[in-house]
Amino acid sequence: MERTDQIVELISKANQSFESGVIRDGQKLTREALKLVKVQGKIPNKLKHKLNATVALSRYFDDISSFATNPKRDELVSKIKEIADNPLKNPRKQADEIHKVQAQWQTLDQTSKTASQKQWNIFRSYVDKAWLPCGDFFEELNKQKLVNATKKQQITQDLNEFVKKNNNKFPTIRILRSKLRKFDDSWNSHAPVRDNVFRKLKSDFMDAKKPIFDEINKQNEQIKLKKEQIIESVAKINSEDMDENISKYMNLKKDWNILDKLPHKLEKTLWKKFISSGDRFFEEQNKNKQLQLDELNLVLKDLKKYEITDLQEFLQKFDLINKSKEYKTLQNQIIKLRNDEKDKRNKESINDLEKLFEYVTEKKDPSDLTNLDSSYKEIFDYKFDMHSKDEILESCIRIEMICNIESLKKDEKIRNQIQLKILTEKFNKAQQTKKEEILLHIKNFFLNLSISKVGATEKNLWKRIIKAIKTS
């Protein structure tokens, strides 16, 4: 009676599996029920009908499975036949392709009704044929596996020698971690090896690493103790001078950073304690930072009210927030204002330089040219008793060349001659700035100018000089 109850339970569970879509489990339970019936012999007709219905359902799913998977198996047979008939030149790639097809076949057998004997025999015959070109490859691979095993043994031996050499005094944990990483990388790089020796090789390698692991754990304990002592020291800081407290805390932080890091989780826990222990020192400082930030925002709102010197002083005043984006904004604004001021001075200086020709030729008072570069003032002391149109023209063309401005087409020949002279001068003269070169040639222009002979030619050349300077 007890076995009959088991049969009833198996049939019930099988039907539940079929209803849930877990077909493989349902079929397994159905087979177990059939085995029990075979052992017991006769069973009640009602139970027999239930069993037959479940068996029929199991076969139905087999038929459905075969209908769905047999075309796929036929496709895999065609694939392996193609590989067998047209082997790849690279044996490794050939082996990979065979493995892929075999894996797909095994997946079908695991997830549906297994292949028929005829299908399997055909598939296996093509697999055997496909493996034939890989024979030499596997022989070579086996030789390489033996070489790799020897190299792994040598690495283990080197590791043992390292441990023996440093057993009395191991290096720091950082060096040990680096050494282990190198040994691991080297050991792992020599693969594959034969399966029957791999376990022994790995066991020997792990045994060789154990003393280093033990030393790392020992040093970790020492580092942990030191970091816990630092945390305790932070808790004892209690001066009335908050700056002094922060200074002591920052020194302890330097001591902390000198120590090697612990395993990530432990390091994170202790670091959190260290930081939280020091938070109390920065509460007052954070208040002062906020006050500075509020004041800085007010300055940024009314930048036009301040001179550049005032803004520069503010930078020193806002020392607690010198890494804030607002502080950076103020720095950029100061740079912009300075550049604007410089551009303005340059523009005014060029405007006065443009008037220089008029003031010289008409003998006006140079004190009106308040923005003229002082280097040009000596021009008013020239005698202006020489007149060389060639020199004046050359000065003009040289300035155009310095400013990367095209000269007139009629001056092209002279410009080429000047270019040759410049190449020669480069070997004999000290390097000058652009400003210095322009000053030199403007002085030469006026040095070769006679006020009594000034005409349209000289005026036009001066206009070309000013245009070139303004354009650059």
Image (spheres, rainbow, N blue to C red):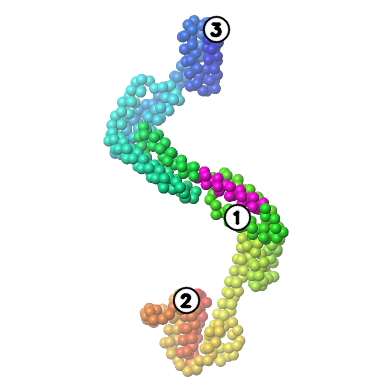
Q: Can residue 317 be seen in this view?
A: yes
For discs 3 and 1, the disc positioned in front in the rendered view: 1
Residue occupying the point 67% across, 53% down: 236
Find residue 283 and report its horizontal and vertical position in percent.
Answer: 70, 55
Find residue 259 and report its horizontal and vertical position in percent.
Answer: 55, 52
Three-letter amino acid code at the position of disc 3: Met
- Whole-angstrom CA distance, mark 2 to mark 1, is 56 Å
Instruction: Please state which of residues 91 and 322 is positioned toward the viewer in this rendering.
Output: 322
Mark 3 or mark 2, which has the lower sequence index? 3
Is 458 included in the stretch rendered in magenta?
A: no
Give the quadrant of residue 426.
Answer: bottom left
Q: Main secondary structure of the magenta part?
A: helix
Is 231 included in the stretch rendered in magenta?
A: yes
Is the residue marked by circle 1 packed among few (<14), some (14-19), or many (20+) residues within 10 Å? some
Q: Mark 3 points at which residue?
A: 1
Three-letter amino acid code at the position of disc 1: Lys
Three-letter amino acid code at the position of disc 2: Cys
Judge from the rendering whether residue 307 lies leftward or rightward of residue 63; answer left or right: right
Residue occupying the point 33% across, 23% down: 121
Residue occupying the point 41% across, 45% down: 164
- Whole-angstrom CA distance, mark 3 to mark 2, is 113 Å
Q: Which of the numbered marks, if any, corresponds to residue 403?
A: 2
Q: Is residue 416 visible?
A: no
- Indicate the secondary structure of the residue bearing disc 3: loop
**Residue range of the region highlighted in magenta in the rendering:** 216-235
Find residue 4 and report its horizontal and vertical position in percent.
Answer: 53, 9
Q: Name the residue under label 1.
A: 253
